[in-house]
Amino acid sequence: MRYLAILGRQPDISLAELSALFSRVSLVSNNMATFSSDTEPSIARLGGTLKLAVPLSEAPLDYLISLPEGKITLGVSDYSPHASARKAQGEALKLKKILTRHGRSVRVVENKTAAISTATSLHNGLSGSKTNKIELILNNKEWWRVIGVQDIDAYARRDQARPARDAKVGMLPPKLAQILINLCGPLPEGSRILDPFCGTGVVLQEALLMGYSAYGTDLNPRMIDYTRKNLEWLRENELSPSRGHSEATAEKQGASPVTTGASDPSPRSGSIHLSEGDATNFSWEEPIDAVACECYLGQPMSQPPVEIKLKSEKQECSSIILGFLKNLSSQIKSGTPVVVAIPAWLRPDGSYHRMNLVDEIKDMGYNVTSNSRRGLLYYREGQIVARDIIILRKK
């Protein structure tokens, strides 16, 4: 089946995520890509995708007329070159006029821009559920029907409602945590995801919600305690983006407890294991099916560092990250994916200074992707310390 993805604000990362999971991925424009999948993907598991759509196999009017009885809520997003809010709204109103002649009641969602925003689509229920609330996408005379919209409210809950937070160690967005896991490629359900710098547990949280097992370690015992509290909160609140309420409830009732430091040689789907340990010398327990983490990013900064400060930060981060990767290399099997976010620093000219560890990493027994050489930088406008995503695989 062919799908259309509307990409997030950093389309190179969104495209890399899709390419890691699906076949025949093709960039349509700077914010759209198509791909193929034998099964319908869940947008709740794709951190870098704002909307998912399928081709409309018939004319838009024929499709809308065939909808079940009842009021239709319709939105039209136009992603064509030179599109405008006026043109998109005109298409929607034209369809409404004809549908009204056929006796259908139609409400058109207002276009403030050519493409309806994710928030507007979500809050108007145009998210692809089996109702008469529909969003159609037009791109160069080709029509698509939206089947999923990124649930920004769910991401906000998982980010802001967790009981244990620490601004000093940084705020890893749940979207980025999903992306890091997905860049590992397709993984069987129940695969064990290791985060050796687990912090407050965001990567482990997203791993559990995606149907994997979570294995976290951190040098700071306070972070292990924070992770434990956050994952217990997750269990209690059933915040599952990819499974229904009944499935989440069943998992909660039969869920394994959060274990700290105890042996878990045969983890099952949804199991959690936490240990205090230094990633540069810790001995992890098997199995490790994939590694996804945000490494040490250095000290928080409020402005671009001067050269001498940049040099010292880079040396400290390099020592920790390379020490970790060297230690990890001897403990994982050939073919194990390793996706890490490492720091890059904003310079006065607006560019980012990368660590350029690729050659040293390769010498440790890892294959390095072409994306890692070019760089996948995740950042907000003006952010001092960005995240440079490196995709590796054990030789």
Image (spheres, helix red, strand yellow):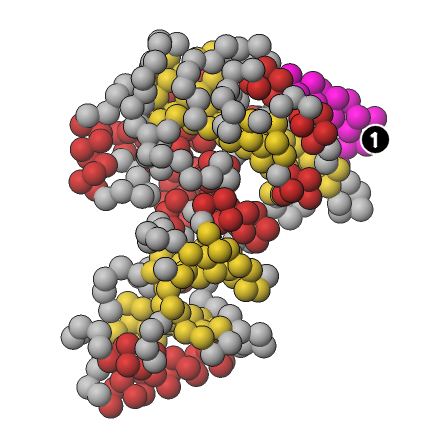
Q: Is residue 318 part of the magenta span, yes or no? A: yes
Identified at 55% across, 47% down, the residue is 16
Q: Looking at the picture, tell me which residue is in the foreground, 188 or 226.
A: 188
* Residue 184: percent from left, percent from top: 49, 36
Q: Looking at the picture, tell me which residue is in the foreground, 359 or 100.
A: 359
Q: Residue 299: in sight, yes or no?
A: no
Q: How many marks?
A: 1
What quarter of the picture does the C terminus occupy? top right
Tag 1's secondary structure? helix
* Residue 77: percent from left, percent from top: 44, 71
Q: Looking at the picture, tell me which residue is in the foreground, 321 or 83.
A: 321
* Residue 391: percent from left, percent from top: 58, 35
Q: Is residue 37 above or below residue 271?
A: below
Outermost residue toward the bottom in this view: 101
| Main SS category, magenta section | helix
Identified at 27% across, 35% down, the residue is 238
| Residue 217 placement, left or right of 270 | right
Q: Is residue 10 above or below residue 393?
A: below
Q: Is residue 392 above or below residue 59?
A: above
Q: Which residue is mark 1?
A: 307
Span colored in magenta? 304-324
Specify the amino acid type for callout 1. Glu
Identified at 62% across, 39% down, the residue is 369
Corner quadrant of residue 56: bottom left
Q: Residue 172: in sight, yes or no?
A: yes
Q: Is residue 150 above or below residue 202?
A: below
Q: Is residue 357 part of the magenta span, yes or no? A: no
* Residue 38: percent from left, percent from top: 35, 53
Corner quadrant of residue 288: top left
Tell me the crowding category of disc 1: few under 14, some 14 to 19, or many 20 or more residues within 10 angstroms, Cα based: few
